[in-house]
Amino acid sequence: MNQETPRAAIVTGGAGTIGQAVLARLGRDGYMPVSWDLSPAAPAARLALAVDVTDPAALAEAAARTLAEAGPIHALVVNAGVLGPVGRAWEADPAELRRTIEVNLVSAFLTVQAVVPLLLRNAGPVRGHIVVVSSVQAKEGTPLSGPYAASKAGLIALTKVLGKELAAEGVLVNAVTPTVVRGAMERGITAERRADLLARIPMGRFLDSGEVAEMVAFLCSPACSFSTGAVFDLSGGRSTH
């Protein structure tokens, strides 16, 4: 990538474990890494903006600031998310359910609405890359993760829709479906829940954030020139489809 031409890469949820790893990796590839997160504490970013990704006005302002301060936007990693309530789906607290769907899924729609028009300003044939961070739970339908799994399944559908809608426009859209990643979310679950999730992974370990970053980096690179609307697993053998 030409270091003399700034190319911004936005990572939502950039202050989190995955976000930090992705920002650092994209920075090594020559992108100008930009974090959009409620927290501006994102050391791996060269520009860190405090952004509520569920607020269209905040996203529009962040997009304008990114363009002005970091240069043309060429990559977007939709990574912001919350674990949501752990329990049986029909017993989920309605407020927690709505918040999970809002943060994980609705915000993805709002984010691409703010960023896609800016990607389309770039010269082709490939004008930009979008990577959506879903979850293997979206494909598996993991018990006790109803709101989270459903919201992440929606992200897979959104990826496939955007892949088709933008294929002729030169914007490639793909998803990754990680299993549990070592970090804050993993530490926030009970020991019993942790053991159950670990037992589902044939490799016998959780995923490292750096491994997620490597896959995302490929999907944001010139090497990814024909894959779009696709889903790339990071499950350690857990995924069966």
Image (cartoon, helix red, strand yellow):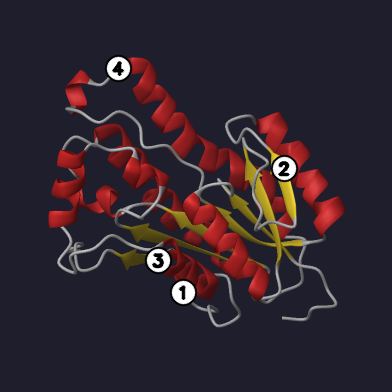
Mark-to-mark CA distance, 2 and 4: 31 Å
Labels 3 and 4: the sequence-earlier one: 4
| Above-or-below relation of 201 to 84 | below
Report how many numbered discs are placed on residues in the image.
4
Callout 3: helix, strand or loop? loop
Please tell me the numbered disc located at residue 49. Answer: 2
Labels 2 and 3: the sequence-earlier one: 2
Q: Nearer the viewer, mark 2 or mark 4?
A: 2
Q: Quadrant of the N terminus?
A: bottom right
Tag 2 and tag 1, C-beta contact below 8 Å: no
Callout 2: helix, strand or loop? strand
Q: Nearer the viewer, mark 2 or mark 1?
A: 2
Name the residue: 42% across, 37% down.
82
Callout 1: helix, strand or loop? loop
| Above-or-below relation of 5 to 112 | below
Mark-to-mark CA distance, 2 and 3: 29 Å
Mark 3 residue type: Ala
Query: Is residue 170 visible to us here?
Result: no
Which residue carries the number 4 mark? 93
Labels 2 and 4: the sequence-earlier one: 2
Labels 2 and 1: the sequence-earlier one: 2
Name the residue: 67% across, 36% down.
51
Please tell me the numbered disc located at residue 150. Answer: none
Mark-to-mark CA distance, 2 and 1: 30 Å
Tag 1 and tag 3, C-beta contact below 8 Å: yes
Mark 4 residue type: Asp
Which residue carries the number 3 mark? 230
Q: Crowdedness of circle 3 by 10 Å Cα count: few (<14), some, many (20+)?
A: some
Mark-to-mark CA distance, 4 and 1: 39 Å
Q: Nearer the viewer, mark 4 or mark 1?
A: 4
**Residue 148 percent across, percent down from the top left:** 32, 38
Name the residue: 47% across, 30% down.
102
